[in-house]
Image (cartoon, rainbow, N blue to C red):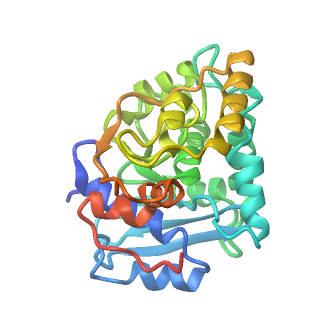
């Protein structure tokens, strides 16, 4: 029996992972269940919701493949509606919480592995989420300790960055010191979560060589490793508005002063978007980062998640 997520599954894992990451943006549990049951999606109606929780800033669910028994954790990315409290938590506390870093606090990582305070805030939120009947994530997986395959941890945008935090945490919780891939981050459009040492750990221990998907024309995966690329975006297309240059330069200078050294884990899996040369920069920034764009680039149908 073949598990949908494996390190040799290629873009099949990408299509299923991005579909689950898109479903994570759905507004409520009932919509998530409905989308998981949709046989027209790459998930083929084979994934059942077995854990769900949300708080003021984050939302996540666990689905299980009915055929293989494999689990996948899906983490929602940033909310885009500024009229919601979640928008301000996601963007200010987590996405932009990059000006201070801390040592990875849960053991296992090499000395010098550092992560953004915003990423730690998001991880802390995920760890306190509780399903009304299943409890928190750790409690759920303790009751399901006999997992037949590795567990995928998927997410788009902020959800991708948090997947690179949650997978190492769960590995330390369930397999400390063991040379085993039990929780696998599969990310899409994720910004950086930590420095070069942390990124190297993700590559070596968590097999992220072929599980970090990014659109080469998406500004978000360039944050906060390649701010100069963002300053020059989009190459050959619409230019960064002049009013954004001073704040972007200020962010770059602060990160340089703090010696943050944000780094993506490896080369990843590049996807080639298409820039509309006549379009507005803000429009292109949104389109290139959109989950629907990632689905299309991976050859998957759109997900009507209400976003």
Q: Nearer the viewer, residue 286 or 28?
A: 286
- Residue 188: x %, y % from top left: 43, 50
Q: Is residue 33 above or below residue 280?
A: below
Q: Tell me the quadrant of the picture where the C terminus can be found.
A: bottom right
- Residue 75: x %, y % from top left: 56, 59
Residue 215 can be seen, yes or no: no
Q: Is residue 40 above or below residue 78?
A: below
Q: Is residue 46 left or right of residue 116?
A: left
Image quadrant assignment for residue 142:
bottom right
Q: Residue at x 77, y 29 (%)?
A: 100
Q: Is residue 174 above or below residue 284?
A: above
- Residue 80: x %, y % from top left: 63, 66
Q: Residue at x 34, y 57 (%)?
A: 276
Q: Tell me the quadrant of the picture where the N terminus can be found.
A: bottom left
Q: Residue at x 47, y 71 (%)?
A: 23
Q: Is residue 114 left or right of residue 258?
A: left
């Amino acid at each position: 029996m073949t598990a949908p997520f494996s390190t040799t599954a290629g873009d099949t894992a990408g299509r299923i992972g991005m579909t689950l990451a898109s479903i994570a943006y759905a507004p409520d549990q009932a919509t998530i269940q409905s989308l998981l049951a949709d046989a027209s999606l790459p998930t083929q109606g084979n994934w059942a919701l077995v854990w769900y929780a949300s708080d003021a800033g984050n939302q996540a669910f666990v689905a299980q493949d009915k055929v293989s028994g494999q689990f996948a954790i899906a983490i929602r990315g940033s909310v885009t509606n500024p009229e919601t409290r979640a928008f301000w938590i996601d963007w200010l506390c987590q996405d932009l919480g990059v000006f201070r870093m801390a040592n990875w606090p849960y053991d296992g990582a090499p000395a010098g592995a550092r992560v953004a305070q915003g990423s730690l805030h998001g991880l802390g939120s995920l760890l306190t989420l509780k399903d009304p009947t299943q409890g928190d994530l750790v409690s759920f997986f303790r009751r399901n300790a006999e997992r037949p395959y590795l567990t995928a941890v998927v997410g788009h945008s902020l959800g991708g960055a948090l997947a690179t935090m949650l997978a190492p945490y769960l590995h330390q919780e369930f397999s400390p010191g063991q040379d085993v891939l039990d929780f696998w981050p599969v990310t899409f459009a994720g910004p950086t979560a930590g420095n070069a040492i942390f990124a190297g750990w993700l590559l070596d221990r968590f097999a992220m060589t072929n599980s970090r998907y990014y659109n080469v024309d998406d500004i978000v995966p360039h944050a906060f490793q390649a701010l100069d690329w963002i300053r020059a975006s989009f190459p050959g297309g619409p230019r960064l508005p002049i009013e954004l240059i001073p704040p972007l330069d200020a962010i770059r200078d602060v990160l340089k002063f703090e010696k943050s050294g944000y780094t993506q884990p490896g080369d990843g899996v590049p996807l080639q978007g298409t820039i509309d040369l006549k379009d507005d920069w803000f429009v292109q920034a949104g389109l290139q980062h959109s989950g629907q764009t990632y689905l299309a680039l991976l050859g998957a149908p759109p997900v009507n998640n209400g976003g």
